[in-house]
Each structure stands twice: as C-alpha cells, then as structure tokens.
Image (tube, rainbow, N blue to C red):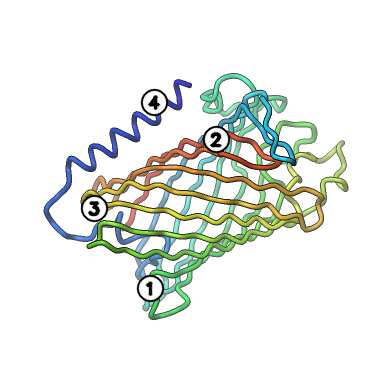
C-alpha cells in the first residue's frame, strides 16, 4: 500500500536524521522531560495538535477469525490545551476537542475531503471534554493521572455511516515513566479506565437514532500501554510500543479486545515546538477491525 510505504519511509528518515544529528550537550529537552507523566508549572501552557489516520480492510469476529472487508478509513484530529494552575505544579486544567472524518470504500486518503453524504462519508466536530491533570504524590513526580469527560456534540443521524460513539465518556488515564541508562532510555506506561454512558443499542429508535454509534454504551474501556524510548540526542527520541485493549460489556451485550504494536519518533524543532510521527498495527483481536494507524502530532510548550 502506497500510504504505508510513504509513512514508514518518513518515519525512518526522521529516526536516521535524529541519530546522525546527535548533540554533545547534556541538556534535558522538552521531548525528554515533558512526558504525559510530567505536569506544567503555574502559568505554563501545553497545546497539542494530534492527527491519526486508521484504515482497515480486514475484521475479526467474536472468535478472533479474520475476514476481508470493504475498506473503512477513520481520521481523528484531537486537540488538547492545558495550563498549570497550582503553585506546586501538581494540578493542570484543560479542554480536549475532536474532529473526525470517516469514509467507507474508496481510497484511504478520501477522508480528507471531509464530505457528508451520510451513506459513505461523515465528518465534523464530534466531542468536547473538560479535563484535569493531577500529580497525587508529592515525592513521585513521574506519576500522574488525567481525568476527562467527553460530551458528544454531533448530530444524531439515523441510518448514516458511523462517525463517533454516541456516549458520554468518562476516562481516567494513569501515567508513569522512568528514565535510565544515563538519560538515554525511558520506559513509559499508561493504564486507562474509561466508562461509556448512554442508551443501549437495543433501546434506540432506528427512525431517529443511529444504532451503530451506540455499540459501546454501558461498557468499560481498558487499554494498557507501554513505550520503550531511546534518545539518540537531547532533542530526539525513537520508540516502540505495545497496547492491549479491552471493551468490557456492562449491559449493552457487546465486548471486544485487540492488540496493537507500533513504533515512532519525536523531535524538538524549536524551544517551543515538538513533532511526532508514529505507526501502529492491530495484530489480533475479537469483534474489531484489524487495520493500521498513521499518526502525526505537533506539540507546543510555553
């Protein structure tokens, strides 16, 4: 697939560039210091613009058996804005909002047309979430959690192609990282607990409500992730990651799980701006798609 080859080539170029441009200084950069575990000082701002393109042509049933399927492509633009509000740098507040564009059939890049014909394409602003970050233990600066409440703001379109979950979603993420090997290596772990609230699919009115967007209602989402990073220089990192995720049925008669493996890199472009590229592949699962994710993110810290 051309998209896959181009993305991997770009990632390799970034990684090789980072390695060959290693610096002699030992200054800790934003790339090394400001992991999700690290909170902001009072008055400091963190703005992240993250884009993920997921595309699939295979699906797994409830028993894990795979089969071919019409290509489905799902683009998500996630925007996060946080600021530090406490003198001791242990509380941050912020907001998250997401814009999506989905396409069934055609080429993966068709999602960037942001069309809305309902039968094959949908797009728009889907969720807004107030959010808070907390470092609960004064003596453990590299442990924190982020709690966010996602509110669906998009129109309910019956019989239309899927756009996003029709759920009020309360998600709490726990972060921990540890740097070792002379600041050259870092292990980062994340455990998420998300609860989807809303009407069961079986109770939805097909004349006025989109049943397919209610598949996750009354469920708990539990992804567990680990990242191993290497820092070729103070301003760059390359990483590999693994994730095991579960959607646990709490009354909607639907559950799923999947395993995803990936790799990526980050580079500090300026004192303020960082760039990140990554690739992920769903290698197994039940009641889920088995596709690939291509991501590009920009982060400003000031």
Quick one: quadrant of the C terminus?
bottom left
Whole-angstrom CA distance, mark 4 to mark 1, is: 38 Å
Lower position in the chain sequence, tag 3 or tag 1: 1
Whole-angstrom CA distance, mark 2 to mark 1, is: 34 Å
Q: Give residue 271's mark.
A: 3
Lower position in the chain sequence, tag 3 or tag 2: 2
Lower position in the chain sequence, tag 4 or tag 3: 4
- Image location (x, y in percent) of residue 70: 66, 23
* Residue of label 1: 141
Of tags 4 and 3, which is closer to the observer? 4
- Image location (x, y in percent) of residue 138: 40, 80
- Image location (x, y in percent) of residue 125: 59, 42
Q: Residues within 10 Å of mark 2 (few under 14, many from 20)?
A: many
Snapshot quadrant of residue 61: top right
Indicate the secondary structure of the residue bearing disc 4: helix
Looking at the picture, does residue 122 appear above or below residue 198? above
- Image location (x, y in percent) of residue 27: 18, 60
Indicate the secondary structure of the residue bearing disc 1: loop
Residue sitting at x 51%, y 35%: 53
Q: Residues within 10 Å of mark 4 (few under 14, many from 20)?
A: few
* Residue of label 2: 54
Q: Give residue 6's mark.
A: 4
Whole-angstrom CA distance, mark 3 to mark 1, is: 22 Å
Of tags 3 and 2, which is closer to the observer? 2
* Residue 79 as seen in the image, left or right of residue 130: left
Residue sitting at x 75%, y 45%: 215
Whole-angstrom CA distance, mark 4 to mark 3, is: 28 Å
Indicate the secondary structure of the residue bearing disc 2: strand
Q: Give residue 150's mark.
A: none
Q: Residues within 10 Å of mark 3 (few under 14, many from 20)?
A: few
Pick the front one: 28 or 206: 28
Q: Are marks 4 and 2 in contact (CB under 8 Å)?
A: no
């Amino acid at each position: 697939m051309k998209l896959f080859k181009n993305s991997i080539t770009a990632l390799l170029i970034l990684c090789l560039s980072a390695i060959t441009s290693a610096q002699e200084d030992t200054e800790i950069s934003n790339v090394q210091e400001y992991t999700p575990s690290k909170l902001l000082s009072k008055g400091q701002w963190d703005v992240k613009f993250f884009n993920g393109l997921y595309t699939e042509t295979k699906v797994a049933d409830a028993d894990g058996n795979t089969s071919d399927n019409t290509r489905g492509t799902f683009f998500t633009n996630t925007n996060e804005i946080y600021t530090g509000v406490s003198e001791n740098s242990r509380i941050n507040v912020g907001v998250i909002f997401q814009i999506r564009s989905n396409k069934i059939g055609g080429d993966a890049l068709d999602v960037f047309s942001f069309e809305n014909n309902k039968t094959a394409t949908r797009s728009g602003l889907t969720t807004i979430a107030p959010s808070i970050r907390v470092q609960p233990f004064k003596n453990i600066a590299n442990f924190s959690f982020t709690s966010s409440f996602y509110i669906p703001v998009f129109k309910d379109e019956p019989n239309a192609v899927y756009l996003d979950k029709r759920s009020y979603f309360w998600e709490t993420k726990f972060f921990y990282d540890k740097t070792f090997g002379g600041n050259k290596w870092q292990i980062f772990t994340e455990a998420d607990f998300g609860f989807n609230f809303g009407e069961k699919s079986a109770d939805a009115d097909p004349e006025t409500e989109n049943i397919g967007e209610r598949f996750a209602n009354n469920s708990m989402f539990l992804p567990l992730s680990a990242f191993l990073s290497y820092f070729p220089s103070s301003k760059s990192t390359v990483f590999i990651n693994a994730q095991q995720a579960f959607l646990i049925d709490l009354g909607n008669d639907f559950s799923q799980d999947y395993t995803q493996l990936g790799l990526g890199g980050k580079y500090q472009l300026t004192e303020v701006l960082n760039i990140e590229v990554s690739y992920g592949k769903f290698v197994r699962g039940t009641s889920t798609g088995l596709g690939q994710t291509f991501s590009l993110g920009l982060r400003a810290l000031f």
